[in-house]
Image (cartoon, coloured by chain):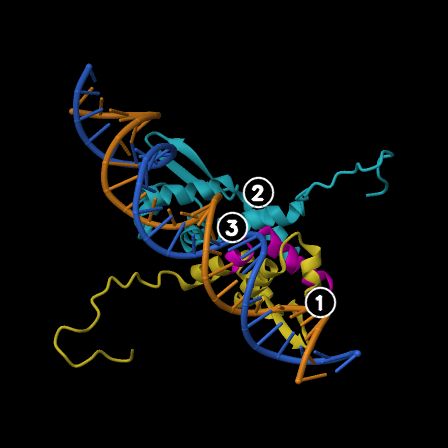
Chain colours: A cyan, B yellow, C orange, D blue
Amino acid sequence: MADCNPSADCCDTAPVALPADPAAERLAGLAWALAHPARVRILKLLIRRQSCICGEIVHELPLAQSTVSQHLKILKNAGLIQGEVDGPKVCYCIHPAGLNELKGLIDGL
Amino acid sequence: MADCNPSADCCDTAPVALPADPAAERLAGLAWALAHPARVRILKLLIRRQSCICGEIVHELPLAQSTVSQHLKILKNAGLIQGEVDGPKVCYCIHPAGLNELKGLIDGL
DNA sequence: ATCGTTCATCGTCGATTTACGATTTTGGGG
DNA sequence: CCCCAAAATCGTAAATCGACGATGAACGAT
């Protein structure tokens, strides 16, 4: 931006697609994880029951087990929850850091 | 809508798909409106510039005018921003109530 | 009345989501 | 060793999203 390189027709003319706003991307990612009623419900459930619960979540939602599993994966990838294996079952609980990050980004708006 | 037609086998026997959790749905809706980097950027822009700005937003984003218009519509439908016509231009500004609702739902988590 | 500008809407197209059943994986018991 | 239950993953079909260009409507200025 400041100056071009010395040669004539240089200077990148690429679309760049600029990294945009990393913070915006992060917030969008977190928001996206919450952008589905089922995922909001799962998160609320895990917050209520401090103790992690497991596929019990499946029984709380009108969704197939595989579908719930996908939603859990999305929440986990976003860093909002974490799951730990406990025998044949898996216990999920909230990931406080992720949740706090979300809250921070939101009311930092 | 109010009542069924008089004949015998009318009346909906539909599964209903129960309203589930209205609060969850609302939060999901608001989150979804923010679930895109461009929309987060627009919102932040409108918050920074107290004064509403208009299609100037288009120049801030690497997107076509029609695309930005769609994003603005989504934000408006979610109740996060509002737009007011000013001659041939349209001024957008944040809708404090919607934004506060979002913040409330998030840190009420 | 006819432009030119600004913005919204329409129609389209590829990519992504959401949901499901079926299958695979994982970890105990009998 | 073989089965059973729990959970993840795969494959797939339907719906929706995100982006664009083109078109349409609203308004001020010439």
- Nearest the viewer among B55 and A100 is B55
Using the image, name the chain to which the residue with label 1 belongs: B
Seen in the image, is A87 located left or right of residue B99? left
Q: Nearer the viewer, mark 2 or mark 3?
A: 3
Task: Identify the residue under disc 1.
Answer: B53
Relative vertical location of residue A101 with respect to residue B22 in this rendering, above or below: above
Identity, as a three-letter code, of the amino acid under mark 1 = Ile
Q: Nearer the viewer, mark 1 or mark 2?
A: 1
Q: Are marks 3 and 1 on the same chain?
A: no
Residue B109 seen: no
Residue B25 seen: yes
Q: Earlier in the sequence, mark 2 or mark 3?
A: 3
Seen in the image, is A55 located left or right of residue A94? left
State the SS at label 2.
helix
Please identify the residue farthest to the left as the structure is shown.
Answer: B8
- Nearest the viewer among D24 and C25 is D24
Residue B29 location, x and y as percent? Answer: 48, 60
Q: Residue at x 43, y 34 (%)?
A: A84
Dividing the image into 4 quarters, which one contains the N terminus of chain A? top right
Query: In whole angstroms, how far apart are the C-alphas of marks 1 and 2?
Result: 35 Å
Task: Identify the residue under disc 3.
Answer: A32
Q: Within 10 angstroms of label 2, few (less than 14), some, or many (20 or more) residues?
A: few
